[in-house]
Image: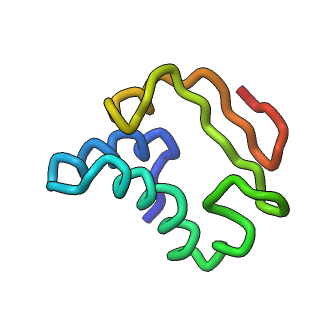
């Protein structure tokens, strides 16, 4: 079953509501998701040689995960798309 991309920001809030720390919730949506999808050698973190997918938000999602809903910019494979 597929889900639209915009549900991830809501998933982070649900993980936190269930007792996960904000840092662990963010890792679950990035590094751990890449590992689960077997693409951790090229996705899931910002580092040389990685896919350079990045989401910039207004605010600090560690302090307030709802900042993930206020997207400022999106990059996919190093190219700005939004």
Q: Residue furthest left?
A: 18
- Image x and y of residue 69, in percent: 43, 28
Q: Is residue 54 above or below residue 2?
A: above
Is 2 placed left or right of 41 in the picture?
left
Q: How far from the left and from the top, in percent, is residue 15?
A: 25, 53
38 sits left or right of 41 in the view: left
Residue at 44% of width from left, 32% of height from top? 68
Residue 35 x, y percent position in the rendering: 55, 75
The quarter of the picture where the C terminus appears is top right
Q: Nearer the viewer, residue 46 or 6?
A: 46
Residue located at (42% from left, 61% from top): 28
Q: Quadrant of residue 80?
A: top right
Position of 2 compared to 46: left or right? left
Quarter of the rendering occupied by the N terminus:
bottom left
| As drawn, 80 above or below 32 | above
User: Which of the colour schemes (rainbow, by chain, secondary structure, one colour) is used?
Assistant: rainbow
69 relative to 33, above or below: above
Left or right, 50 with reference to 36: right
**In the rendered image, which quarter is residue 45 located in?**
bottom right
């Amino acid at each position: 079953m597929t889900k639209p991309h915009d549900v991830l920001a809501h998933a982070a809030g649900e993980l936190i509501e269930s007792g996960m720390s904000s840092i662990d919730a963010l890792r679950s949506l990035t590094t751990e998701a890449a590992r689960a999808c077997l693409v951790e050698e090229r996705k899931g973190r910002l580092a040389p040689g990685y896919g350079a997918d990045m989401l910039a938000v207004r605010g600090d999602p560690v302090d307030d995960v709802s900042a993930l809903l206020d997207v400022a910019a999106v990059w996919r494979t190093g190219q700005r798309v939004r």
